[in-house]
Amino acid sequence: MPEELVIVLAIIVAALWVVIKIFGAVSKGLQELSKELHEGRAKYRDNAFQKKRAKLACYVKAVRPDDLARAERTTSKLQSEFERLRSETVWIAKPPTWEKKRFQRQLSSPQTEFCSEMNIEEIDAVLCPNEVSWFDKESSILARDCIYPLAAPVMECSEFREQFVPSLELDEATLEVDRTAIREKYINRFFNQELLEVEQYNQRRVAILARYSDLNNQIHAWNADQRMLWNRYVQDSKRMAQEELDNYRLHAREYSDECNKEKGTVSAALQGFIEGKKELTIARIQCILGTLTMPWSIPRLWEIDFDEEQHILIVEIALPDVVHRPPIKTVLLKSGPAAKPLNQTERKEFIPKVHPAILLRIAYELFRNDTSKLVKLLVVNGWVSFDDPTSGVKTKAYTASLMVEHHQFASLNLKKLDPLAAFQSLNGKSAGRIIDIIPIEPVLNLKRSDSRFVEAKEVLNTLDGSTNLAAMDWQDFEHLIRELFEKEFSGRGAEVKITQASRDRGVDAMVFDPDPIHGGKYVIQAKRYTNTVDVSAVRDLCAVVRKEGASRGILVSTSTYGADAYAFANNEPVTLLTGAELLGLLKKHGYQFRINLSEARRLLSGL
């Protein structure tokens, strides 16, 4: 029984499975058939739609201009350019620039006693003349137009350019329909896609135009604001430009004034030099000395005097102290150049050349710039200022002196000569080859007071303050000179023999000085002159000195000496004392007096 039941159940299950399979196959077939029928109907409808649409398409045309992409690019570019311009545009007024050039003065530099340590190699630089003479520099100064050489400031304003907004026109997209050939319902049914595309195009067009219009409004507002700021910027720029132009004109005027002042000074000095006027001649000599290119080891101190009548130029200059501050030399070591002191042989060779070299250079430059040969006789005296080792007192001693005429320098070549040999050949006075400070007596000193001596002063015992020595009796004058030198020499143990007064017999006094170095027999002659003492008087005195066997002659005058007299005396054992020096010698012994040459000429001419 149970076995039969199992068989029955198995048969039933198998039957059900078969039925299910059959139903599934039928259902799938029906679905596929339904799908095929649906697709067929859809294809049919689509074909019918397309045929109908194609039939109606000739009555419908979608017009969409191809401008939107270009318009968007134009708008974006304009937006970017506007943003850049807005960030870069700043209206800040600035004053125009101009170059300020100060006037470079060509006149002499200020005097100073400062000097550095001397290197022996600098002797070559001392003997090297200026590349450009003062005469040439003077000519260039006088040729100036004194116009400020640099351009005036010019206002430079940036231009304001309004941001330009071009017009933007975009046509609408439209769907053109021949409504006589097609019904309205067919337009929406068959051309809905075209309608949608036209609508999307127009929406995009409206957005672009709105963006462009907003940008246009921003640019117009920015242009208005910037125009106002730019106008203010231009006004500020003009004000600043005018201020700078005023400053430029003031500076240019100062430049021209300084230039014209220097030009006038140089012109006056040159003209005064040509005419032999004392103050202007000294001014021009100051220019020449002040523009010399000398090593910094040479002090830049000098004093100048000029005799208008005899055209004698006296220049006294400071010299470096080569004894207490000897020069050095430069030697090359493995570590490089080094400064070393001179050995004894080098000191003896080089130190005696220093002062003569400086005096030769000074004389050379002065004659070089005296093209008109105004100076008949030039005297250059050099002094050294030092602390005396024996007392510690600041001491000034003359160590070199040179008296020369123009023709003596005409053929000299400073670069090749031996300074000491040349100095000695010109009869210069110095310590020679002795390397110590040995004071000398200058061949001719500066006049320390006015050559006319118009101020009334006390005179010797029998004379009152109104007496003019230049107008006194010639015998009284000779007696006065004899008395003076008796006082001058008696303090040194010398014996003064007074000769009998006689008019110009040649000897007014004889002095016998026992000093073994500076002593000897002196012949003194007095000349009460109101005019310049010429060379003949010096020659006569030299003859008397030789005749008397004297070691030196002294000629004393109330007047001055000519250049030829000094030149002749420079090579002879005679000393010339002018009226100025006579006054100084008398004052030394406690006497004061006056000399007035003009007054003496008038008084003596009336006798």
Image (cartoon, rainbow, N blue to C red):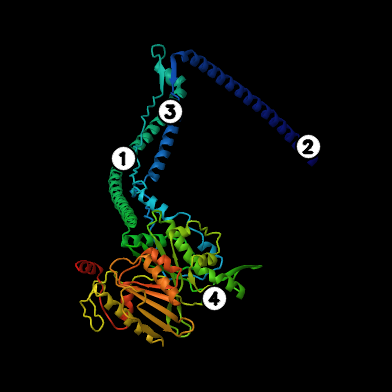
| Lower position in the chain sequence, tag 2 or tag 3 | 2
Out of 270 and 513, give the one closest to the viewer: 513
* Mark 3 Cα shell of 10 Å, populated few (<14), some (14-19), many (≥20): some
* Mark 4 Cα shell of 10 Å, populated few (<14), some (14-19), many (≥20): some
Residue topped by disc 2: 7
Indicate which label's residue lies in the foreground, 1 or 4.
4
Q: Is residue 517 left or right of residue 539?
A: right
Indicate which label's residue lies in the foreground, 2 or 3.
3
Q: CA distance from mark 2 to mark 3?
A: 77 Å
Amino acid identity at mark 4:
Ile
Out of 357 and 549, give the one closest to the viewer: 549
Q: Is residue 25 left or right of residue 135?
A: right
Indicate which label's residue lies in the foreground, 2 or 1.
1
Q: Which mark is residue 159?
A: none
Indicate which label's residue lies in the foreground, 2 or 4.
4
Residue topped by disc 3: 201
> Where is residue 558, by image quadrant?
bottom left
Asked if residue 122 can be seen in this view, the reply is no
Residue topped by disc 1: 221
Q: CA distance from mark 1 to mark 4?
A: 93 Å
Give the residue furthest to the top: 181
- Picture coordinates of residue 48 (x, y %)? 52, 16
- Name the image quarter holding the C terminus: bottom left
Amino acid identity at mark 3:
Tyr
- Name the image quarter holding the N terminus: top right
